[in-house]
Every structure is written in C-alpha cells, then in structure tokens.
Image: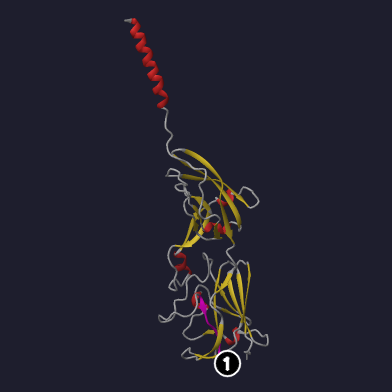
Amino acid sequence: MLKYKIGYTAITCIIVALIIPACKKTEQGFLSNNMYYIENPLTTSQGGITVSSSLVADGSTTPLSVMLTKVVNADGKDVDSILTKTDSIAGFSDAVTYLDSTLALLGKKLTVTTAKPLSINSTGGRIQLTPATQYVAPGTYTISVKASNVRGAVDLPNACQIIIGSSGGPDTVYAGTYAGTFNLSSGSYLSGIATPGVNLSYSATAINKIIYKFVDKTGALYNAKTGGITSRTGRWSMKQFDPYYPQVLTDSSVEYQFPSVPNQFPVFTNPGINGVIPRGNYGVFPAIPAAYNDSGYPVFVFLDMAFFAKGTFVVTVTFSDITWL
C-alpha cells in the first residue's frame, strides 16, 4: 500500500510542476516607443493661442497619461523655467464696442488671468500654447515627454519642435490708403487726388499716443491748431475710436492718447454710421477744411490701421498735389 502512495505522490508533483509554469502572469496592454505628434513642428506666434492634436498612440493601449519632462532652445539650453512659468495675461471679459466710451466702462471689461506659455494636457498629451508666449523670445524649442499607460512608461525625447514666431511689427496697415475731395454737407466723393504717402514710426514711451502729421507737396506741416481737423462727413474719425482722452491739436500734429489695453488699439472695429458699414477694419477719414488747402474743397485721406504695442506712434501722411493755405 505504501508503494502505491509514493507513486501517486510522485505523479502529483510532476503534474503540478508542469502546470505552474503555464500560470505565469500575463502582461497587460501595449506601449509603443514610436508615438509622435502630427504637428511637428508646432508653429505659433507670440501672444497667440495654439493647441496640437493628441499624441499619436501608435497602437498603445489608451488612455495615455503624458507629462512634460524637458524643454530646450535651439542651442540645447534647458529653458523649462521660461516656458512653464506662470504669467499674468490681460484680456476682456466681453466684446468691447463704441458704447464703452469712457475709461470706467472700458475698465469694467478688463480682466487679468494667469497662464503658462506652454503646458501638456495630461490625458492624451495635447500641447497647449497660450497668450503668455508674448513673454517668450521668438525661436525654436524642443520638448521631451513621458507617456504611460497600464503597461508602464516610456520616455519620448525630442518629441516635438515648437516654433514661436514674432508677433510682427507694432502696427499694421489694412485696406489701401486713398484720398480725395468731398461735399461737406453730404460727404459724397467729388474728385480724386494722388494717393498720399504714409510713413509709420514707433518708439517705446511711457505714454501711449498716436500722432498724425499731415505734410503738403512743399514739405510744410499742416497747422491743426489754427485750421482744425475734421472728418469726411458720415465717416469715422480717430476721436470716435478714442473717446477716452481729449483730442490735442498742435501747430504740427493731431494727437490721441490711448489707454493700455490687451492686444491692440482700437479695441473695436468700425461699426459704421446709420447701419452702413464703411471700408476697413479700423478706417478713419481725417480731413483738412476747404479754407486751409488749395483744392477749394475739404480734402480727406482714408487710413486703416491697428496699433499693437504700448508707446508712441507717429503717422506721417504726405500729399503730393495739395498745398496748405
């Protein structure tokens, strides 16, 4: 009887030995080393908002958790502290219109939020670039990330290049400039004159100001303090875009101080007169009265431009076929 017990025990041990290796723990999921971003390089401009697609999983089990591990500039220098630093961003809580005609009303719509120039959405890995990139120097940056799922984690060095371009010049001219004479009572166009030359210059100053200078064909500056400045009848003037400070007339210029605002000034587009939409985004029609030019009629110039920086802008308009009286 003992002989059979021993034999039975031996057989049992053999069976157990054969079964145990088959019970080895099965690995869960899959994690690729070849995940990538579709938008590579990802391009934005200073102060812009740009969001990439999610990290392409390349068959990896989802959901993926993604974290930023490194940011370097074109020279390979670690700039993580610059791209991920929280900064204050000014904005508007609602659309600004011509009805926000005082500093107090405008101020009610001003808001300040905080954001990092660069962040990674932890779920899926979207790259998020915010208006805080206005504080980041233009250039090419490279990010590395770590992705993880139920299988484990993998480092993805040099996962994506990010190109931050310059926000551009401090001002922009939109629709083409033109000029002419007009009927003072109706504002109707009477005759054309040569398109004036327009020169814009900018300097960083403590006071935000737009200065218009009007030069005739002899090189003389228009004396707005004596002759005054008006606008083509039924059209907008800078004074309507900028009701926040008094218009200042000097013997060589017309000046408009403007408030510190997010993004650009004017802060709203031209709404038109009596429901009629005029030309341009921020079009104004400054005009020289008939008594102060040699055409015999009021002379206007159409200017359509926006200003993107704090400081002083000088807009010099030169007429080639008009003389001031």
Name, please, the residue furthest toward the right.
218
> In the displayed structure, would residue 207 be above or below residue 223?
above
Q: Which residues fall within the magenta stretch?
A: 282-292
What residue is shown with label 1?
291
Of residues 215 and 228, which is closer to you in this image? 215
Judge whether residue 234 can be spotted in this image: yes
151 displayed left or right of 210: left
Judge whether residue 300 can be spotted in this image: no
Of residues 5 and 194, which is closer to you in this image? 5
Name, please, the residue furthest toward the bottom.
296
Of residues 197 and 70, which is closer to you in this image? 70
Location of the N terminus by quadrant is: top left
Q: Position of residue 291 (x, y in %)?
A: 57, 92
Location of the C terminus by quadrant is: bottom right
Secondary-structure class at tag 1 = helix
Name the quadrant containing residue 309. bottom right
Q: Magenta includes 21?
A: no
